[in-house]
Image (spheres, rainbow, N blue to C red):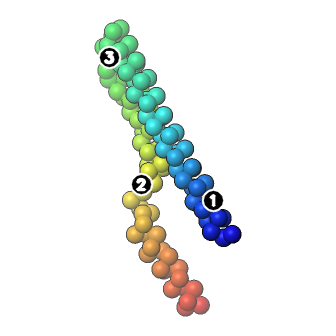
Amino acid sequence: MEQNVNQQEALQKAKKRVNDLKGFYNHLMVFIVIHALILAAVLYFDGNLKFFITFSVLGWGIGLFIHALVVFKWNPFTGKDWEQRKLKEFLEEQENR
């Protein structure tokens, strides 16, 4: 019984991870398509790439970068090493009480 619960929890986590990745890749595809269209329009009409790069690519790019950080669970401040150190620290604190 417990094994079925663990398997179901693992399946739910895997499904969530797949959905998160799918969401990021969709975000990336939309970013690329929209910016290709905007770039074509900018080059066709006035060629002012400074505005395009500064506001469109940089602005949306920051959001896309943050989305990637969340989805790929990259955080240099609270990585696996940090987690292990904190767990050890908290366990030692509880033992000393």
Position of residue 64 measured from the top left corner of the image (x, y, whole percent): 44, 38
Residue at screen point 63% across, 59% down: 8
Q: Measured along the vertical axis of the image, is residue 93 above or below residue 86?
A: below
Residue at screen point 32% across, 13% down: 43
Residue that badge 2 annotates? 74
Residue that badge 1 annotates? 8
Position of residue 66 measured from the top left corner of the image (x, y, whole percent): 45, 44
Whether residue 55 is visible: no
Of badges 2 and 1, nearer the viewer stands 1
* Mark 1 burial class by Cα count in 10 Å: few <14, some 14-19, many 20+: few
Picture quarter with the C terminus: bottom right
Name the side, left or right, on which 32 lies relative to 93: left
Q: Measured along the vertical axis of the image, is residue 65 above or below residue 48?
A: below
Mark pair 2, 1: CA separation:
26 Å
Of helix, strand and loop, which one carries label 1? helix
* Of pointers 2 and 1, the one earlier in the residue sequence: 1
Residue that badge 3 annotates? 48
Residue at screen point 42% across, 42% down: 65
Position of residue 78 measured from the top left corner of the image (x, y, whole percent): 44, 63
Whether residue 65 is visible: yes
Q: Measured along the vertical axis of the image, is residue 95 above or below residue 25?
A: below
Of badges 3 and 1, nearer the viewer stands 1
Of helix, strand and loop, which one carries label 3? loop
Picture quarter with the N terminus: bottom right
Residue at screen point 40% across, 28% down: 32
